[in-house]
DNA sequence: TTTACTGCAAACATTTTGCAGATGT
DNA sequence: ACATCTGCAAAATGTTTGCAGTAAA
């Protein structure tokens, strides 16, 4: 029987549906992720997990991230800095992300005409394109307003 | 005075122009890279460099890669596997890459209409987009032909 | 009760750093 | 001559693994 009470927590629901056991440490990791705004690194969670009582082992964090990524509940992104980070996302078919460089919050983005660009590139390059990844970085609406106000303090 | 004799070796020329000294180890690293087809990892070059006489130190490889990336002569890409690799590329303004998953060879790709997609995403998401990265993976024309022939041996 | 999971510690992989001596310009 | 660069070895990061005990279903 599946743990219906967890269905509201998307991360746990995804694990449950995939047949993973809903253990204490996994619930704790899901909770750590849910408490975060924006993207997070494995190291962030390891730090958080160490402070928890009982502490969550490093290996468990990595293994849980692997499981969550496997079921599509989180996705790994490569920050411009070169760091690896994760974001939570709906297990949708194929999409991309806009990531805020200030707060790290990410939004899912649909095709928006990218398929046409990809097929044009295929034609021009002669490559058969099997996969692509588009990552966008900038400022989310909130941070944007904050920074633009700061830059022009006497407007408005 | 700049080392004109090196102008033909794009990697060294780029370092020279940027004011880096053209040292023995740097020439050797440029040579290792030039001998490679497709993308390569830092570890690849470290291995190659170890076999060289005299050997090139690990730290020197990393420092040279950093310099080359800084002057835009090589670019770091994130493979679908999660590995970091480098490819050589012309220091062009802004471009993307199609990478062959078989041989690792990469081709530069221009805008191809991506700017329109990015601005549509900006509008739809409300983000102000400052940077983006598009990475494409597939088969180059050569590997494509090889595999397609192998898959349908009695055609043609 | 059975199999999956956890914690721990060690191993492993990757990249960076300090420093003394070598080398390009 | 002198600043830059190299090699070395150690350290800092980041991630994985083996194994004995624990807990979910």
Image (cartoon, coloured by chain):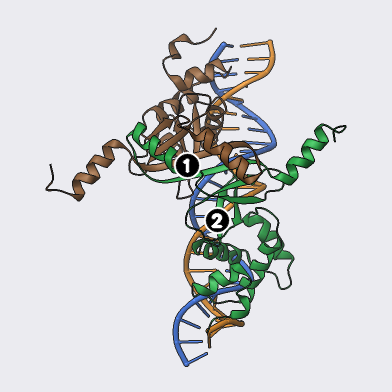
Chain colours: A green, B brown, C blue, D orange
Q: Is residue A102 left or right of residue A87?
A: right
* Residue B61 in picture, x, y percent from top left: 51, 33
The answer, for residue B33, to whether it is visible in the render is yes
Q: Nearer the viewer, residue A57 or D7?
A: A57
Quadrant assignment for the C terminus of chain B:
top left
Q: Residue furthest right?
A: A154
Quadrant assignment for the N terminus of chain B:
top right
Question: Dot 1, crowdedness within 10 Å: few (<14), some or many (≥20)?
Answer: some
Return the chain for callout 1: A
Instruction: Identify whether D25 is placed above or below C18.
Output: below
Q: Is residue D18 left or right of residue B153?
A: right
Q: Sequence-wise, which precedes: disc 2 or disc 1? A: 2
Q: Nearer the viewer, residue A33 or A6?
A: A6
Q: Are marks 2 and 1 on the same chain?
A: yes
* Marking on residue A47: none
Return the chain for callout 2: A
Query: At numbered mark 2, what does the secondary structure look like: helix, strand or loop?
Result: strand
Query: How far separated are the C-alphas under marks 2 and 1?
Result: 20 Å
Residue at the spot 57% in from the left edge and 19% down from the top edge? B20
Q: Which residue is mark 1?
A: A114
* Marking on residue A75: 2
Q: Is residue A25 left or right of residue B38?
A: right
* Residue A61 in picture, x, y percent from top left: 61, 64
Q: Nearer the viewer, residue B9 or A137?
A: A137
Q: Nearer the viewer, residue A12 or B128?
A: B128
Image depth: mark 2 or mark 1 in front: 1
């Amino acid at each position: 029987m599946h743990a219906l009470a967890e269905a509201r927590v998307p991360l746990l629901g995804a694990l449950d549906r995939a047949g993973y056991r809903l253990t204490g440490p996994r619930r704790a990791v899901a909770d750590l992720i849910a408490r975060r705004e924006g993207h997070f690194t494995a190291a962030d969670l390891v730090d958080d997990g160490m402070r928890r009582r009982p502490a969550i082992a490093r290996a468990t964090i990595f293994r849980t991230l692997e499981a969550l990524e496997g079921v599509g509940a989180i996705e790994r992104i490569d920050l411009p800095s070169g760091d690896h980070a994760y974001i939570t996302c709906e297990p949708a078919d194929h999409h991309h992300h806009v990531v805020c460089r200030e707060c790290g919050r990410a939004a899912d983005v649909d095709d928006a005409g990218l398929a046409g660009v990809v097929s044009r590139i295929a034609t021009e390059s002669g490559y058969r394109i099997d996969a692509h990844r588009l990552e966008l970085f900038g400022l989310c609406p909130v941070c944007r307003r904050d920074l633009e106000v700061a830059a022009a303090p006497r407007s408005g």
